[in-house]
Amino acid sequence: MIMQYRTINVSASRCYNIHIGRGLLAGIGELVRPLLGHCRLAVLTDSNVDALYGNAMMQYLTSAGYDVCKYVIPAGEASKCAENLLAFLNFLAREQMTRSDAVIAFGGGVVGDLGGLSASLYLRGIKYIQVPTTLLAAVDSSVGGKTAIDIPAGKNLVGSFYQPSMVCCDTALMDTLPAEIYRDGCAEVIKYGMILDAALYDTLHTLPFDREAVVARCVEIKRDVVQQDEFDNGIRGLLNFGHTFGHAIEKLSNFGVSHGEAVAKGMVIAARIAPLCGLCNVADELSALLVEYGFDITCGYSAGEIYDALLSDKKRRGGNISVVLPRAVGDCVLHTIPVEELKELLHKVI
């Protein structure tokens, strides 16, 4: 019997539930059966998660009567690549998975993105379930249907919008996260407060925060945004606060800088640009909170290097690029800037 949990419903091109609670993994079979019935399941996970929880996941699913196979990729951003995408698709084919079967993406953002994209492509689309194991994946990448892999030209440039059939978030899985991986997720949590919820932002000054409550609130915010703009043509762009510059930093570091660390640096850059565009100056306040959480907010790259890396960003439209800038804590706006003007702005803040 699974323990008490919260359920948040998402109404998008596919409607689904996000279950959040401590100890949910033990009841994964009970949660998926009403949704999937009796089918075969392919679990995609990474080497770190597999070592900790792989056997437990397989046991819970087989005990619930499921025929399960498992595919393990090396942990790390480098695994979110075309080679692993094709390798997993070939694995699904060798296992003779059908359209009535499903993928379970069991891991952090890399596994979730790769699993979701694979599910969207295999047999032109089969169901998949997100089981996030990191704070970052729980509050961000597991929700909303963005799936992607990286290519040498940039991060997330090959992907699809493909909603999961369910998200099962067991917050107890985060107990074993290394401090720096947990901190990565805190950058996304702070982002949610900055863009749309000043009250959430204020609670983050008290450490440690209530994990389940904060995860649920972040998921609610993302759910509300996705329901308004599933395919990222408007308000969903607010979720990219810090990401435009963060992705550039990730690319320049060859992904040696983690996603959360890069987003933290990117949020500071955006906050420093805001007053130069006639908006508010919250850079010092935001920087202080990020430092309190242990982030190194120094950029590490020159304005020219950041600018060059930005030129392949998905948010660029011709000679303009959309950047999320704060008007106040809890209130951000999409600001379109000519790329040449952005180059000048970067030289002023970096």
Image: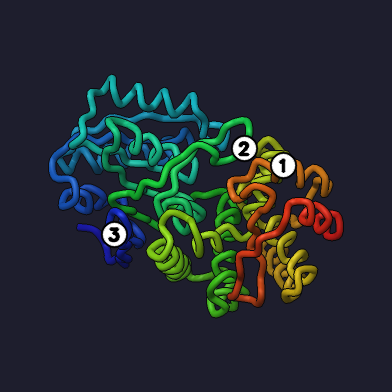
Residue that mark 1 sits on: 309
Tell me which residue sits at (31%, 51%) in the image: 25
Q: Mark 3 and mark 2: span between their CA atoms?
A: 32 Å
Q: Secondary structure at mark 1?
A: helix
The reply to whether dot 1 and dot 2 touch (C-beta < 8 Å) is: yes
Residue furthest toward the top? Answer: 94
Mark toward the start of the polypeptide (1 vs 2): 2
Nearest to the observer: residue 349 or residue 174 = 349
Q: How many marks?
A: 3
Q: Quadrant of residue 205?
A: bottom right
Q: Mark 3 and mark 1: span between their CA atoms?
A: 37 Å
Q: Quadrant of residue 72?
A: top left
Mark toward the start of the polypeptide (3 vs 2): 3
> Does the image show residue 175?
no
Q: Is residue 6 left or right of residue 273?
A: left
Q: Where's residue 206, x and y in %?
A: 60, 75
> Does the image show residue 344?
yes
- Categorize mark 1 by other alpha carbons within 10 Å: few (<14), some (14-19), many (20+): many
Tell me which residue sits at (19%, 50%) in the image: 35
Residue that mark 2 sits on: 154
Tell me which residue sits at (58%, 60%) in the image: 186
Residue furthest toward the right? Answer: 348
Tell me which residue sits at (54%, 80%) in the image: 199
**Residue type beneath disc 1:** Ala
Q: Where's residue 141, x and y in %?
A: 47, 51
**Residue type beneath disc 2:** Gly
Q: Where's residue 330, x and y in %?
A: 59, 75
Q: Secondary structure at mark 3?
A: strand
Mark toward the start of the polypeptide (3 vs 1): 3
Residue that mark 3 sits on: 17
Vertical position of residue 50 compared to residue 230: above or below: above
